[in-house]
Structure formats: structure tokens, C-alpha cells
Amino acid sequence: MDKIIEILERMHPEVDFNTCNTLIDDKIIDSFDIVTLISELSEEFDVTIPVEEIVPENFNSARAIHALIERLLEDE
Amino acid sequence: MQHNRLRRQAEEGIRKSYYLTIHNQEGMRRMQYNVLEYLENIVDKVPDKTAYADESSAETFKEVYDKSRAIGTFIHKQGHYKEPVVVFMGKHPSTIITFYGVIYAGCFYVPIDEEIPRHRIELIFGSLRPKAVICDRDTVNTISEYGFDGKVYLYDDIINTPVDDTLLAGIRDRQIDTDPIYIVFTSGSTGIPKGVVACHRSVIDYIESLSAVLKINENTVFGNQTPLYVDACLKELYPTLKFGATTYIIPKSLFMFPLKLVEFLNEKKINTICWVVSALTMISAFGTFEKAVPKYLHTIAFGSEVFPIKQFKLWRQYLPNARFINLYGPTECTGMSCYYEVNRDFELDESIPIGRPFRNTEIILLDENNKPPKPGEVGEICIRGTSLTLGYYNNFEKTGEVFVQNPLNTAYPELIYRTGDLGRYNEYGELVFVSRKDNQIKHMGHRIELGEIEVVANMHPDIKSACCLFDNDNKKIILYYVGDISKAELAGFLKQKLPRYMVPNVIEQLDTMPLTANGKINRVLLMEKYRQGNK
């Protein structure tokens, strides 16, 4: 979780990612970020995020991203 | 009484001659003078076909025609003529209709959008001094925040204006093809965006050439990605009118979710796209093609950036029958100036050429001595042709710096535009982009002056010094600063002042700024520092 927040904070240092759960809905993360975010997550956790998982629900909060990564790591 | 009758007859005459010119041209090819003729020529042929649509609305050619003429009538009757009218609306078909309405009024449209931060909008208002702004229901509530004290008109209200044919015919009669039709703003190194003014003639010249290269016809279904406040959207807007094609405005949020995006393309049977490279690579890089392929696409134009060959190969692999066309050109020369249709394979370390100029445009390479370089050597790309825009609005000084006399012609006045891009011809005789002469970069399809970001950072009272760099390999904007302010605070400040695509991706604080012997910021040293930190 800390690692995920670290990655997010590098992109948007002014956002509190511990509480925010509208990252997509409020356009905090936008198309400019998504490519960076996914490539950094893949590298940090050594997982491949399949395209069908790149949906709004999985990226709306640091918690949702965390859940996604956990799920992908378990599946491996 | 006599007077009134004569006036009526005169008006009738104008209207007749107007309709004769516009509508009775079968069998004879008459030169086109006005971009609105595209609309007038098509509206009777396919009145009920959808011209522009988004998720929630669609407008037929007849609706575009009627509503834009209502807007034109209204704006002109309010006393606006030959002046900039700001169109401050969301990304919808109604916004495009409003553009045409402003041209009908004999004015020129200046598109802005809520994506543009307030500071930049204020600068734009400052350089334009517009008397009128057209808003939609969302933006009409925020316009007062910009300190604008002119007229504000609401789209929903003014489209109900009864059309005054005589009035519009009179405006048309006085319009000439070098009259401006729009102003779009581009990054300026001094921190002030520059307003590029394009005219009917430059746009017609561009649309005719572009349509021929892309092979647009009445079956074309465009999927628009680029914002309406940049000239990139000309590619969809005007060819749609010229051929009676259809343009779908793709919701911006889909450009984060590749599978949904491909579903949208297939659902709308989109066959032609003109996107920035980063939008295309977003699809290919995530392995989308293994799950879904945009099966109707046959024409894919891209530009403004280098296409990474690895990603490009994926596109070609999954769409082997599609045409791929690289476009190149500065806003100052109306849209795009050069094209290259991919007809061979490229190695991973190669870049796709920018090819050759459009019809009726010439590219001249000039070296430091204003002479053509030797074959195969690098020179500044300079553009000659009708596609040159009129220059920067309210800025003769900046205009004069880049719209200059062709140094190869000493006999009569002839303007060329100096792009500041360096290029050379390869072994195939194709033009290839080499680099920039200055600190201008291309990022996410947008043209950015790093100097503008520095100027904005330096506006913060706690910033002592700032230097902006671009990591071209990883496509990141880096800002180094010295000052008593946290990274988070500075990031928040920059987000308020700069468009999203100009906000630095990496911000680093320094105790002191490294300087060169001349006392300038040592950019080379900073770049080395950045690269070492990344290892």
C-alpha cells in the first residue's frame, strides 16, 4: 500500500491518496497519468496488468489499486 | 415609400445573387472563397445525415446549417463584426456549430475550454480583449470568475434567433478569403500564449490537400480525439462538411481505458482517426489488440510526435490493410504541412519520415547562413505557401520574427514561416525531422515552450530560481527549483496556472541552481544530474 501511495504521490504530490476514492471520477488521474501509473506499478510489483483490468473501478483509489495488485499477485 | 421599395428590390437582388452563387454551380467549377460553402454545398444533399455527434447528442447537416445561421444572425445583430468572439463551451457538437455561427456573423471564433486553467484564460482575454463570449449551460456559471466584463451569450438562447437571410447574404458579400476565421493559442516562451490567426484561404488550402491525402469521402466516419481549442480538430471539422461525412467526438475518459475505447470505435463503425501518437500507443502498449481490434479502421493519421516503432509495428500487425499516415506541421501554417504514408518497414532505431509537403506548399531548408544546405545535410524547415496563417494576433513583433521574407528571393515580397524545427532529406528523398533549434518540445501531442513553464514557476513568490528540462526518452517534463516551498505546494500552484499537459511530471528541489561561466542556468549539468538520479 505504501509503495502504491508513493508512486501516486510522485505524480500528484498535492493529493491525499490515503483518503481520496474518486481518483477517476474527479479526473485527478487522467489519460496523461494512466500509462505512467500502469508501467510503474508493473515494474514495482513485477506483475502484468491485463487490459481487461484497466477499468475505472480498479483505479478510483489507492485501496482499489492495492486490491487489484494483490489479486494479480495471488493469481500468479 | 419609393425608398423602401428600392431597398427591398436591392435586398432581393443580393439574396438572389447569393443563392445563385452558392446553389447553382452545377457543371461549373467555381473557386471557393469561404469555408461555409462546404456546409452550404452539402446541406441539400444529405440534410438528415448526422454531421457531428457525441455520447449524448447528434446534429444533422440541416441542424448545423440552421443553428449556425441563427447564431450568425444573432451575433451580427448585437453589433459584432470583424472581431474575435470567444467560444467558451465544452466538447460537444453544439460547440462546432457555434464556430460556424461566428463565421456567419463575419467574426472569427476563439475556442477555449474549461480544461484550460484560469490563469491562461486570463492571459488569452488580455491579448484578445474580446467584446463577446458564447457559453453553454455549464460554462455560463464560471465565466464571471475570469474578470470578463463584456457580453455573455448563452448557446441555448441564441440558436432560437430567426435567421435573417438578407443580413447573412450581405455579410457574405463583403467577406473575402483572407479574412480571419479563427484564433487558436499556442505556447509562448515568454509566458504569454500566442494567438495564431487563420483565414478562409489557408483553411481551404489545407482541407483540400488533407482530404486528398487521407482519401476522405461520404463514407468516412471520423473518431475525434483532439481538443476543439487547437487546430488539430480542423482535420475532422471541415472534411465532414466538404464530403457529408460523420464525426463522433470520443469521450475523453475513454482514452484511459483502452478496451472501452476500442468498443466505442467498433460500435460507431469509426473508420478514420487522426490522433496524437500517445493516444494510439495507449491502445497498443496494454496488449489491447489481443482482446479487441478496431475492425472498421482503414485510415490512421498521426502526428506531432515520434511514433515508437515497437508500438507502430503492433498497429500494423493487427491492422495490416489500413493506411498509416504521418502528418507534420506547425499551427502557424494551418494544421499540417507535410505527410508521409508508410510504405515500408522500419527498424526499431529509425523514425518515420515526415515525407513531403502537401500540394501547393513548399518546404525550404535553410542553414545558419540562410542558404540551402548540401544534399542530406540539416537545415531549418521553412514553409512557403497559401497555407501560411496571418500571424499572431495583436503581436506584430513576434509575427515579424518568424513570418519573414524568403531569403532566397530578393526580388519581391514573399513570406515564409520559420518553424524552428531542424530537418534533412534521407536517401529516399523524404524529409526527416531531426530536432528543435530551441527549448520547444512536443509532449502528449502538444507543443510546449519549456520557458513558459519556467516563467510560471518563477511567478510564485517563494521561488528563487526554476529550470525546466525534458526527458525525451521517457517523455517526462522535469522541473528543478530553488526556493522555500514544498514540492506539493509548487505542484498545486502549477496545476492552477498551466494546462494539464504542461505540468511537470517530476519536480525536484535544489539548494542552489548550478550556473554556467556566463551566469546562465547550467541545463547540461542538470540533465546529467537527472539522468544519474534515474540510474
Image (cartoon, helix red, strand yellow):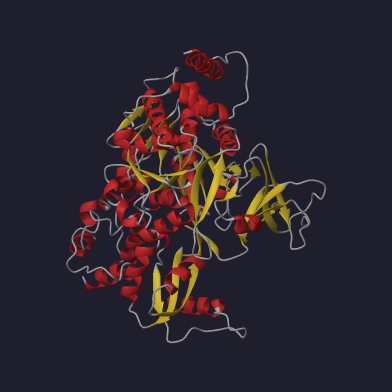
Residue B295 in sight from this viewpoint: no
The one of B483 and B160 positioned closer to us in this rendering? B160
Q: Residue at x 34, y 80 (%)?
A: B485
The one of A73 and B492 positioned closer to us in this rendering? B492
* Extreme residue toward the right, this view: B411
Q: Residue at x 44, y 69 (%)?
A: B456
The x, y position of residue B486, in whole percent, is: 33, 79
The x, y position of residue A73, in whole percent, is: 23, 63
Which quadrant of the rendered structure holds the C terminus of chain B? bottom left
Residue A27 in which image quadrant: bottom left
Say above or below: B178 vs A74.
Answer: above
Q: How many marks?
A: 0
Say above or below: B321 vs B66.
Answer: below
The x, y position of residue A65, in whole percent, is: 22, 61
Residue B366 in sight from this viewpoint: yes
* Extreme residue toward the front, this view: B1
Taking B334 as reference, is B146 left or right? Answer: left
The x, y position of residue B79, in whole percent, is: 44, 37
Residue A76 in which image quadrant: bottom left
The one of B310 and B389 positioned closer to us in this rendering? B389
